[in-house]
Image: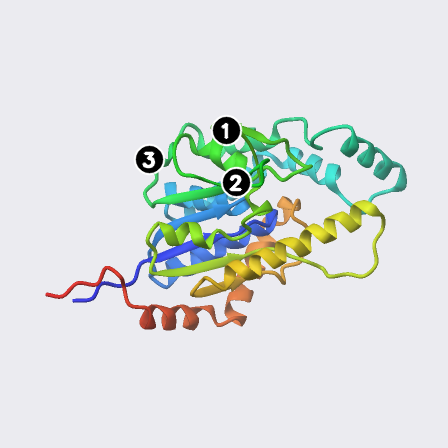
Amino acid sequence: MKKCPSIGLALGSGGARGFAHITLLETLHEMGMNVSFLSGSSMGAVVAAAYALHPDPRVLKRMTRHFLDVFRDRIHELINNVQANVALRKRIVFLTRLVNSISLDHSDFLYSSLSRIFGKARFSDCKIPCVVVAASLKGELVTLDEGYIVDAVAASASVPGAFPPIRLGGEWLVDGGVISVIPVSAVKKLGADVVIASHVGYASFKRGFTDVLDYAIHLDDIKGEILANEEMKEADVVACFRNIKVPWYRFDLAENIMENARRVLEEQNFHNKLINAMQTRPSEKAVKT
C-alpha cells in the first residue's frame, strides 16, 4: 500500500505580506491536506513556527487579530519610522537616524511582540517539525530548530536597518531573507515528498527614484526576487503572492492581505496544481503489503 506523499511548506520572507501565508494554510486545511514539515524565513518563520505549535489556521487568525489589537500603536509607530514617502523634514530625520544607528527601532518592538506569541515555547513543543533560517553577519545561512522559538524567530525576522541583529548561539544573526528568501532546501532536508513554496516578496522594478535610500531599497528588492526565483525552481508547487503590492511594514493591512491572497490562489489554480503534484509525486515512504 502506498502512503500519501508528505507535504512540506516553505514560507518566504516579505514582512506584512507574510499574512498571505495564513490564507495558504487555511486553503490547505479546507482541502483536507495535512502539512508534515515547515520551514520559514523572516515573517515566514513567524507563521511557520506559530502553525507548528498550533496547527489550526483559525487559531492563527485569532492570534493575528489579537496581535493587531494589542500592538496597534506600536505598529503605527513602526510605519511612521520606516515610511519612505514622507515630508522632506521628516525624511532628513529618518536618514540621520539611519546613518547614526544600527537600526531604526530602539523599542524592542520585535522581540516583545514575538514574546506575546511564543512565550516560553520551545521547538520540542511543536506538533509539526519546523525549522527557521537566519543569516549570520559572516554571510552564512543558519538553520535554527532547537531552543526557545522566540529567539530563533526574532533572529530570522530582524530586518537589517529596521531591527537590530540578534545574538544567538555565539553569532549575530539577521533576517533570513538576506540569504534565503524561501527556505525550500531546509524543508526538503526534513523529509518532505512534495514541497510548496510560498512567495510573498515584491519588487516594483520602477525606473524613477526619490533619493539614494529609495534606490538602495529597490536594489535589495531585486536581489530578493532573484534569490526567490532560484529557490522556487526547487519546489513542486508555488503559491506566488508577489502581486500583493503592500510595503513590508504595513502590518495594519493584515486583513486586506489575507483577503487578496485567497483571490490570488484562485487565479493561480493552486488547488488543481497541488492535487496534480500529489498524484504524480510518489511517496519516498511508500511500502508494500
Gap in Å between the C-alphas at discs 2 and 1? 10 Å
Gap in Å between the C-alphas at discs 2 and 3? 19 Å
The answer to whether residue 246 is seen in the rendering is no
| Residue tagged 3 | 124
For the C terminus, the image quarter is bottom left
Asked if residue 244 is positioned above or below residue 63 in the image, the reply reads below
Locate residue 235, reporting x and y percent.
45, 62
Gap in Å between the C-alphas at discs 1 and 3? 18 Å
The disc, 1 or 3, on the residue closer to the chain's N-terminal end is 3
Locate residue 100, reporting x and y percent.
78, 28
The residue under label 3 is which amino acid type? Ser
| Residue tagged 2 | 134
Asked if residue 182 is positioned above or below residue 278 in the image, the reply reads above
Crowd class of label 2 (few under 14; some 14 to 19; many from 20; radius 10 Å) = many
Crowd class of label 3 (few under 14; some 14 to 19; many from 20; radius 10 Å) = some
Badge 2 marks a residue whose secondary structure is strand
For the N terminus, the image quarter is bottom left
Badge 1 marks a residue whose secondary structure is strand
Circles 2 and 3 in contact, beta carbons < 8 Å: no
At 74% across and 28% down in the image, what residue appears? Answer: 101
| Residue tagged 1 | 168
Decide which of 89, 189 is in the foreground and name it.
Answer: 189
Circles 1 and 3 in contact, beta carbons < 8 Å: no
At 41% across and 27% down in the image, what residue appears? Answer: 120
The residue under label 2 is which amino acid type? Ala
Asked if residue 285 is positioned above or below residue 41 in the image, the reply reads below
At 54% across and 71% down in the image, what residue appears? Answer: 267
Q: Does residue 62 appear to the left or right of 201 in the view shown?
A: left
Badge 3 marks a residue whose secondary structure is helix
